Amino acid sequence: MEEILSCLGLLILLVTLLATISLLTPRTSWRLFESWQYKNYEYHEPSGCMLFSYRLGGCLVLVVLAVLAWLIFNGLSLIANLGGV
């Protein structure tokens, strides 16, 4: 059980890092995820709408992660209080 929680924690940390990059610097996020499609990505700039969508996506992912983390930790404490763990 502890191995699963540590892997889940690592995954949450990685997704949080990527979502924070998308929220704070959407152009860097575009370079990470989209620029590989172009031979010379320096000549292809993302539109303002694309940058906004990366920013919005990063924000939404962080909100979902916060809710999931809250549910996981409250659920584990509830189980521990009931004597299940």
Image: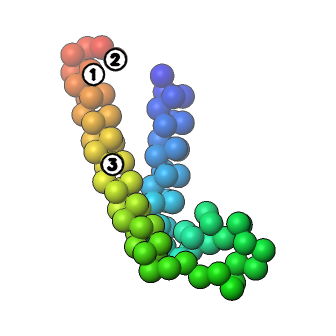
Comparing labels 3 and 2, the label whose residue is closer to the camera: 3
Labelled pair 3, 1 in contact (Cβ < 8 Å): no
Q: Rounded to the nearest whole Å, what is the CA distance between mark 3 and mark 2?
A: 26 Å
Q: Rounded to the nearest whole Å, what is the CA distance between mark 3 and mark 1?
A: 24 Å
> Secondary structure under badge 1?
helix
Q: What residue sits right under mark 2 in the picture? A: 85
Query: What colour scheme does the image use?
Result: rainbow
Amino acid tagged 2: Val
Q: Which residue is pictured at 36% across the width and 48% down the height?
A: 65
| Front in this rendered view, residue 25 or 51 | 51
Which is nearer the N-term, disc 3 or disc 2?
3
Labelled pair 3, 2 in contact (Cβ < 8 Å): no
How far across and how far down the image is residue 44, in percent?
65, 81
How far across and how far down the image is residue 76, in percent?
30, 28
Disc 2 crowd, CA 10 A, few/some/many (<14, 14-19, 20+): few
Q: Is residue 82 visible?
A: yes
Which is nearer the N-term, disc 3 or disc 1?
3
Q: Is residue 31 left or right of residue 48?
A: right
Q: Which residue is pictured at 66% across the width and 70% down the height?
A: 35
Q: What residue sits right under mark 1 in the picture? A: 80
Farthest right residue in view: 39
Amino acid tagged 1: Ala
Labelled pair 2, 1 in contact (Cβ < 8 Å): yes
